[in-house]
Amino acid sequence: MKNKLIQGASMMAISLMAMATQAQATTSSFDVTTIWHEPQTQPRDSIFVGSFDYDSATHTITNLQGKLSESMTHTGANLAYPNDSMVWLNLNYQLASWYDPSLGGTFAAAFKNNNTNTFYNGTPGATDFWSPQVGVDNGATYFGFPVKANNPGNAYALIFVPDAPLSALSQAQIDKLAYADCTPTAAGGMMAGGGMMGAVCMTGTSLAGYGMAGTMDGFPVSQTITSSVPEPSSMALALIGLAAVGGIASRRRQS
């Protein structure tokens, strides 16, 4: 009887170890908070709070979505995040993602609209109307300029996920984080026009990453990624431990 219990516990442990090995390549869910410092709207900053799924085998980000704060708009006391009264935009569409081997990680962008039309781009034959560099090169003028009615009011947040998602970002990686807010001014806003700042979108970029800080001098300062649920491999390993403990307890009862 003792031998059968030991064999049974061993077989379960081997099976769960195999499950753990397979689980390590599955997709895991994470939460992310990205902050751009806004010198001109203190103590409010531009902040993206969201979630995403990440496949460590393919370095692929999916289902990125969240909320982007508008540091220029407020409807109450002048409090900083997370006790703020800022207007928050829903960014529900992940429309861009790519792997950057030089930085060792994956970029992804979530948008307010179900398209990437964000910035004006006067280059003949242009197809890029959203990238941070295009925003810098074209003065962050909104898509559809000069007709206010043609402004689609888009916004986005660009995040970076390193190969080890929970590791701290390097300064070079932080420098590439960016956001753009080209929406018309919301209730309680400070300025009127085609966008938050008239023809110009409110943006956050870095001098090191794109050659210029944002339109209100905003620049990226941090990004934090945390696991939103226990990873499958961790759960499997925990089951292995429980199986081993169970096997020991059974052997003790039979002795």
Image (cartoon, rainbow, N blue to C red):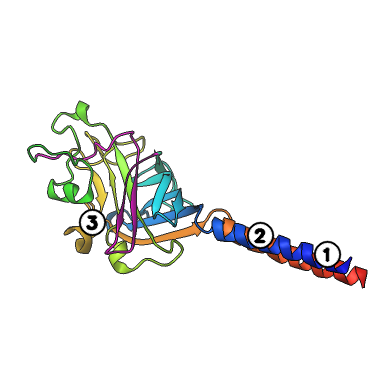
Q: CA distance from mark 2 to mark 3?
A: 52 Å
Residue 81 location (% of width, % of height): 44, 54
**Disc nearer the start of the sequence (2/1):** 1
* In this view, 118 is above or below 36: above
Discs 2, 1 touching: Cβ within 8 Å: no
Mark number, residue 16? 2
The C terminus lies in which quarter of the figure? Answer: bottom right
The local crowd at label 1, few if under 14, some if 14 to 19, many if 20 or more residues have their Cα within 10 Å, is: some
Mark number, residue 190? none
Task: Identify the residue under disc 1.
Answer: 5
Task: Identify the residue under disc 3.
Answer: 217
Discs 2, 3 touching: Cβ within 8 Å: no
Q: Quadrant of residue 176?
A: bottom left
The local crowd at label 2, few if under 14, some if 14 to 19, many if 20 or more residues have their Cα within 10 Å, is: many
Amino acid type, label 2: Leu
Left or right: where does residue 154 sit relative to residue 124? right
Give me the residue at 66% from left, 59% from top: 15
Residue 71 location (% of width, % of height): 34, 48
Q: Is residue 112 magenta?
A: yes
Q: Quadrant of residue 101?
A: bottom left
Q: Nearer the viewer, mark 2 or mark 1?
A: 1
* In this view, 74 is above or below 42: above
Left or right: where does residue 225 sit relative to residue 73? right
Asked if residue 110 shows in the view, the reply is: yes
**Which residues are drawn in magenta?**
93-122
* In this view, 151 is above or below 9: above
